[in-house]
Image (spheres, rainbow, N blue to C red):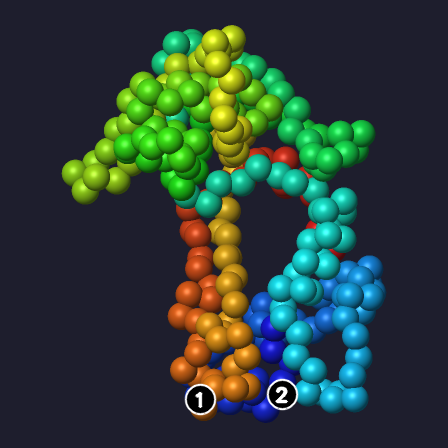
Amino acid sequence: MILDSPLLTVSEEEGNYIYGFFDKYLISLHSYTPESINDLCDLVSVTRRGNENFLSIQLLEHCIRKDLDNKARRVFALLDPVKVVIENVDDKFAQVGTALHFPRDPAQGGYNITLTKEIYVDRSDIRLEDNKDFFGFAPGKLVGLKYASPVRVKQILTDANGEVTELRVDLEAEPKTKPKTYLNWLPVKESQSAIVNIYDYLFLSYNPNEDADWKSSMNPNSLIVKTNAKVHKSILGIIFG
């Protein structure tokens, strides 16, 4: 977060370090809930050093996550979707589950999500070779799907460059063993395309004020844009604000 006006002026004039007036890095404390700011104030102390006080941004992030935990509805999303075909069910197969808006508070309800023959999973949850510390999709592995029956991986298809293009699996409604993890997924027919911006810290150093040249500590990966993401269609009914 940048709150330093001279720094903003230099950023705009010298190198397009920010991306317009509504850039995430131009947000002020008004972007945070009053409860999160109050929580931050309770956690920190004030000294005579005044503006020389330096607090880690992670502390503020902790406060906002804590406050939004029971305010921000959850919706399934995949940043890099890969199609999965469940081979041992027919085209009309449909298993309806309820994904919770707030996993820690089921009383607040949820939305229907339907397991069908074709679904999406995230590429980051797939490995071509299995190991004991990996609980995602790998050859022969039993993997749990949140709010649905688990599946067992039969085949992982790849292209000429070795990139995963599709998974073939079998549904195991009553597995002999319990999956070690339950992963996010999306039905192909209930998915909505989306562009997702992933923000990281603008600076690589802990305190850019201590660097001889603050521009040298700029994070080149502070913004990653995912143009092929998928979200559940229920997000279309959510009013943000």
User: Looking at the rendering, which quadrant does residue 238 occupy?
Assistant: top right
Tell me what residue is drawn at x 55 percent, y 86 percent: 209
Q: Is residue 219 above or below residue 227?
A: below
Residue 5: image tag? 2
- Name the residue located 70 percent from the left edge and 42 percent from the top edge: 73
Most extreme residue toward the left is 160
Task: Identify the disc placed on residue 213.
Answer: 1
Which quarter of the picture shows residue 83?
A: top left
Amino acid on which the number 1 mark rests in the picture: Asp
Amino acid type, mark 2:
Ser
Residue 141 screen position, x and y as percent = 37, 22
Residue 89 position within the rendered picture, expressed as x and y whole percent measured from the top left: 43, 10
Q: How many marks?
A: 2
Marks 2/1 in contact by CB < 8 Å: the verdict is: no
Q: Is residue 224 found left or right of 43 in the rendered image?
A: left
Q: Is residue 22 visible?
A: no
